[in-house]
Image (spheres, rainbow, N blue to C red):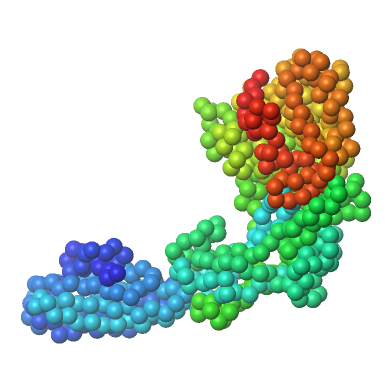
Amino acid sequence: MRKLIACAIGILMAFSFAAPGNAMPVASGNNVHTFQAGAFEAHDGWYSGEILVGWHGNGNNTTDLTFTGNTGDVVATPFTVESNKQREGAVGVEIEMTAEEQEVVFTLTRVNGKSLTTTVEVPALYADTVTTHALRTAINPGYYYSGALIDAGITMTAGSVDKDSFLAKARVTEYNGDVQGGFGNFGWDPEKSDYALGDGWAMWNVVDAYVSDADGNRVEKGQYVKLDIEWGTRTVEAGNAAERYDVPATRAAWYVGASPWTSYMSFATVDLEIEPTASAPVGLLDADFVQGETQHDPLFDQFQLSEAPGGGMAALYTPDNATADNRRPLLVWFHGTGERYNGGNAGGNLVGNRALSFADEEFQSALDGAYVLAPQSTTSGWNQSRLADMEQLIQSVIDNNHVDPDRVYVGGLSMGTGMTTPLITSLNEGAIDFAAAMLVSGGGLSAAQAGIVADKGIAVYLVGNTSDGAANNQPAALENLLAAGADAKMMRYPAGPVFDGTYYYGAHDSWNYVYNNLVVDEEGVTIFEWLANQRR
């Protein structure tokens, strides 16, 4: 489409050519004889110069200036006619440089309707250094490298890149220094052995590439490129367990240690090399590609990490709609054995089994916005000795945020039930008044404990698998709760591995049913809906 400009004669100011539908009137005489681009030079991403206009006679008429062919913006500074003796002027022009060459044609239409044209050849903007950032994404099975964000530092337009514009390879090193590279169960997928490049390196299969903003969102024009790669894991049912196979060089965190009690979900590091191909924007072909900081899952960055009382860490998510006049519920969630804090994995409990789910759209929508507090224990784990610490932490979050004190919920998985139970049965002066609790993949309540829970009016949901030895005490706990008059229910899954509709897990991993909101009672109420309905 032809693009045009508008301005008022005699006022010296800058005008953008972006708005169509208007011509820019340029002062001149009746007989324009010169219309020519002068010298242009590049500076700060713009190609700047002048277009000279010359005429015979008095400069008391106007002619229309328009242009076509630009990709970036064009900004013009019109000239002023100071006297009738003036016979020429120069329109200042700045053309935004992009990753592609541009041929911008300016047209001047004289009073008699005839036109003069002049062309400005705008060179492509070349980048000296391009910074690449590996991106991580959490799914229920774990944490993975899912692509990269390229900060080109030059303006590119949509369509100037595609999946064939870049080649990428990576080498991943676990927290303990081991380089990933083995094929097989809980390793690289044998079906993708041709991805391996040797010495721990593997090809990243780029499935899409597009111009984006700094957050990786598609845009029509920008200085970033988002690379989406093939990533994640493939799982296969294996008795009461599951076999799993990762896309090579994509697993970003895993359990590192010699035994279950000495293993911790810890972040890996990645060496990433990206290079442009011949189909990449010409402005990137000679650039130096350097690796920048690896970026967390966007939901991870929405949690505020801080030190917890008594040791370990605490991660807090704050909903956007929380205000003094709109107090929101709080869910406190305790992780299992493998997600303890070991000094180098702050927030590992958010991605070890995707507690990030509670900050995701489905849970937040079900509760119309909720705070999520995810404490991370020291290597000693969760037990009665941390009760006062956790009560202090939870009360601090309630006091210092817009939390509805009548809708404070608590839950935990596996070892995390060993912190949930002391909290809901606490008789301390600082005991928290919970409205509901979830005991997942573990947990047991004696008759005396069930009586305390019933007296407090805490609703309880037990979730487990009949093949999971850690959940063997759940049926007895339910019986004790109901006998005490508590509001309690249980979802007991049949023998076999856990399956969330996409991935298989071991029988212990019933928390995946909770994270995916798959737990549904006999009346069709999901566990998220059940929780949202609980009030003290």
The tally of labels here is 0
Q: Is residue 297 visible?
A: yes
Residue shown at 79%/18% (left/top)?
Answer: 482
23 is higher (above) or lower (below) than 456: below
Residue 255, placed above or below residue 318: below
Left or right, residue 46 beside residue 390: left
Quadrant where the C terminus lies? Answer: top right
Q: Quadrant of residue 393?
A: top right
Q: Position of residue 20 (x, y in %)?
A: 27, 64
Residue 512 picture location, percent across and down: 73, 43
Residue 258 or 444: which is nearer the viewer?
Answer: 444
For residue 103, which quarter of the picture?
A: bottom left
Furthest toward the right, the residue is 259
Q: Position of residue 423 (x, y in %)?
A: 79, 26
Q: 511 and 15: which one is in front?
A: 511
Image quadrant for the N terminus? bottom left
* Quadrant in the picture for residue 232: bottom right
**Residue 390 visible at all:** no
- x and y, in percent, of residue 136 in the image: 67, 57
- Picture residue at 25% right of the left edge, 66% below the top: 5
What's the residue at 58%, 79% (across, down)? 277
Q: Tell me which residue sits at (44%, 77%) in the image.
A: 100
128 and 356: which one is in front? Answer: 356
